[in-house]
Amino acid sequence: MKPAKPRQKPAAPPAGSPTPAPRVKAPPAKPSARDEASPEEVKKPRAGMKAWDLRRKLEALAARGINGEMAAAKHKLARLLDRMDFSKPALDTPDLFKGVFVRANVAAPIMPFTPTDWDVGNAVKHAFEKETGIQCCWRADSLMAEAAPTTASRMNSIGETVATNFRELWRQFSAAPGVNPADRANFVMGLGDGMLDEIRTGTALPARARPAKPARKAKAKALAAPPGISLHPYSVATALGKQIRFEVPLATIARELAATIKGELTA
């Protein structure tokens, strides 16, 4: 093994040559007026499904909260909006009508409806035609669609989800004081419009059904009864319909409806 060569010292400059100036560290560049006027914006994380669900709950409490809930909800809502980006739904947001729906030349049965559920069945039919582009029709009490077998199976699953939500939410709302059975038409219409983002804005809400005038004895009992809910069924239902589309669990939607009714009755 050869021995390592010793390091040689750099040659000294010849006599009379100028001494090089020492290196000076340059100061950091001063930001321009343009940079100071427009600092780089920090991007907020996009809101996911949980954040959207929390936002809806806080908005409901901020509008109808009681016993300090309203102020606390407004504060939490402001912090949430400042922290998350709600400009558009998250890319992984569930959607009942997401994906490809394949047509067929022959109509296939989707699901049956009873005569008491014609309004729900027509809402499901309209949703299928608008969101999938597949023509639907009635054959006796069965909803049919010109869909391929796999698509028809998927439409059956979607229809069952929508119909179950519509029925259960109306059953819950109809039990509230002051709700008339004739309010069902406006409530079902609101669920459908909310689910399809067809909410009526700038136009008068459909007239709410009025109960028949009570007899004298019944009138005295009615005056002694606690006041009922005064919210329009259509307005209540539209917010719930949006959540049905994004596959929010029925139990979660039902809790929100219960909070809305409670807030209205205790206001």
Image (cartoon, rainbow, N blue to C red):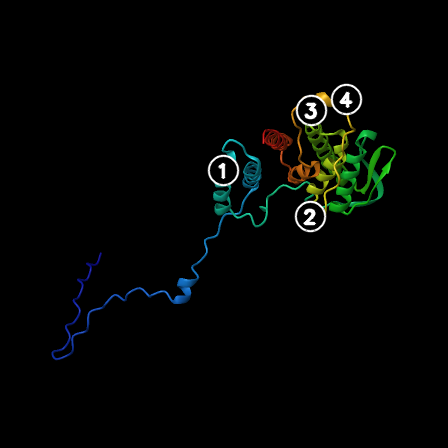
**In terms of sequence position, does the residue under pointer 4 or pointer 3 come before the other?**
4
Kindly report the distance in space between the C-alpha atoms of the residues bearing marks 2 and 1. 28 Å
Numbered disc 4: secondary structure: helix
Which amino acid type is marked by label 3? Leu
Label ID, residue 216: 4
Numbered disc 1: secondary structure: helix
**Picture layout, residue 176 above or below residue 107:** above
Which amino acid type is marked by label 1? Ala
Which amino acid type is marked by label 2? Thr
**Picture layout, residue 224 above or below residue 187:** above
Return the x and y of residue 140 as percentages of the image width and height: 88, 33
Kindly report the distance in space between the C-alpha atoms of the residues bearing marks 4 and 2. 40 Å
Kindly report the distance in space between the C-alpha atoms of the residues bearing marks 3 and 2. 35 Å
Label ID, residue 223: 3
Mark 4 surroundings: few (<14), some (14-19) or many (≥20) residues within 10 A: few
**In terms of sequence position, does the residue under pointer 4 or pointer 2 come before the other?**
2
Numbered disc 2: secondary structure: loop
In the figure, residue 99 lies in which quadrant? Answer: top right
| 2 and 1 marks in contact (CB < 8 Å) | no
**Picture layout, residue 101 above or below residue 259:** below
**Picture layout, residue 92 above or below residue 11:** above
The residue that label 1 is drawn on is 71
**In terms of sequence position, does the residue under pointer 3 or pointer 2 come before the other?**
2
**In terms of sequence position, does the residue under pointer 2 or pointer 1 come before the other?**
1
- For this rendering, which residue is in front, 226 or 2? 226
83 left or right of 171?
left
Label ID, residue 201: 2
